[in-house]
Image (cartoon, rainbow, N blue to C red):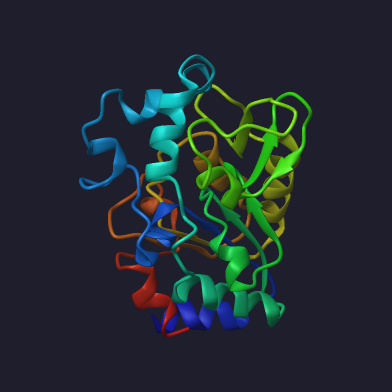
């Protein structure tokens, strides 16, 4: 822990790259742990439900799952979200690159948040492009529809869909120019997001995760603990 605090205190630019483990301490279930969504039993595999093809062909079933399992509105930022926002306010943290879609970083006060997989808080009519917030979608009955009659789609990256190129480029830029990269709460198994670490050029790569990752051997500091335990002392 003292090593981490020392590295942060000496750093001029920190970027945080986070995954589902950042939000699990707020109560949001992750995907790949033994109790995660992907290891629960459904009529269809979650990976299939959360695909572009399934959304188009089985929209009602998609929304049944999406509303039940992806609604993050009742959750609040935890100590990790809060501490990261504080580091940004102090000018130390330059950007957050996140795989999460819950918007909790912004709720905690972070400004420069690069959401690789989109956000439940942005939803658009597929017919006219009108914007709808998360409350409208999650509180709707059945398939959420626009006033024009079109189907509303969440601005989240489903399987078979590409990441937003502008966000991806900005994430690469921020990671490549920072002197400290903290990676937390991610197994680093989901591409192309996990490949972003390869753009890091500095000498302070810090990995915080309960389980081992494929990048542990190249990290300068590996901490196998919960993010909450670490960030409450920063």
Residue 11, image x, y percentages: 63, 76
- Tell whether 141 sits left or right of 95: left
The x, y position of residue 69, in whole percent, is: 38, 44
Q: Is residue 9 above or below residue 171?
A: below
- Quick one: quadrant of the N terminus? bottom left
**Residue at x-position 30% and y-position 23%:** 44
Measuring 69% from the left and 83% from the top, which residue is drawn there?
Answer: 90
Residue 106 sits in which quadrant? bottom right
Which of the 4 image quarters holds residue 185?
Answer: bottom left
| Figure label count | 0
Q: Is residue 11 visible?
A: no
Residue at x-position 51% and y-position 23%:
55
Measured from the top left, where is residue 176 in percent x and y? Answer: 68, 52
Of residues 207 and 82, the one nearer the viewer is 82
Q: Is residue 52 visible?
A: yes
**108 horizontally vs 21: left or right:** right
For residue 140, above or below residue 109: above
User: Residue 7: x, y in percent?
Assistant: 53, 77
19, above or below 150, in the image:
below
Q: Nearer the viewer, residue 216 or 102?
A: 102
The residue at the point 65 percent across, 69 percent down is 110
The answer to which quarter of the image holds residue 128 is top right
């Amino acid at each position: 822990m003292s090593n981490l605090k020392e590295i942060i205190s000496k750093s001029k630019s920190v970027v945080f790259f986070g995954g589902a483990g950042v939000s699990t301490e707020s109560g949001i279930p992750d995907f790949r742990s033994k109790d995660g969504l992907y290891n629960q039993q459904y009529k269809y595999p979650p990976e299939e439900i959360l695909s572009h093809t399934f959304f188009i062909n089985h929209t009602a079933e998609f929304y049944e799952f999406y509303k039940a399992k992806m609604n993050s509105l009742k959750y609040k930022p935890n100590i990790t979200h809060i501490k990261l926002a504080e580091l940004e306010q102090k000018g130390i943290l330059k950007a957050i690159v996140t795989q999460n879609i819950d918007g909790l970083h912004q709720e905690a006060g972070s400004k420069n948040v690069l959401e690789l997989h989109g956000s439940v808080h942005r939803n658009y009519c597929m017919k006219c492009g009108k914007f709808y917030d998360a409350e409208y979608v999650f509180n709707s009955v059945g398939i959420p529809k626009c006033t024009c009659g079109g189907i509303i789609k969440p601005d989240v990256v489903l399987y078979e869909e590409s990441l937003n190129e502008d966000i991806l480029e900005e994430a690469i830029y921020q990671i490549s120019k920072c002197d400290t990269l903290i990676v937390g709460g991610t197994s680093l198994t989901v591409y192309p997001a996990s490949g972003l670490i390869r753009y890091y050029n500095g000498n302070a790569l810090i990995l915080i995760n309960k389980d081992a990752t494929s990048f542990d051997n190249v990290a300068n500091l590996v901490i196998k603990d919960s993010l909450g335990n670490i960030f409450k002392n920063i």
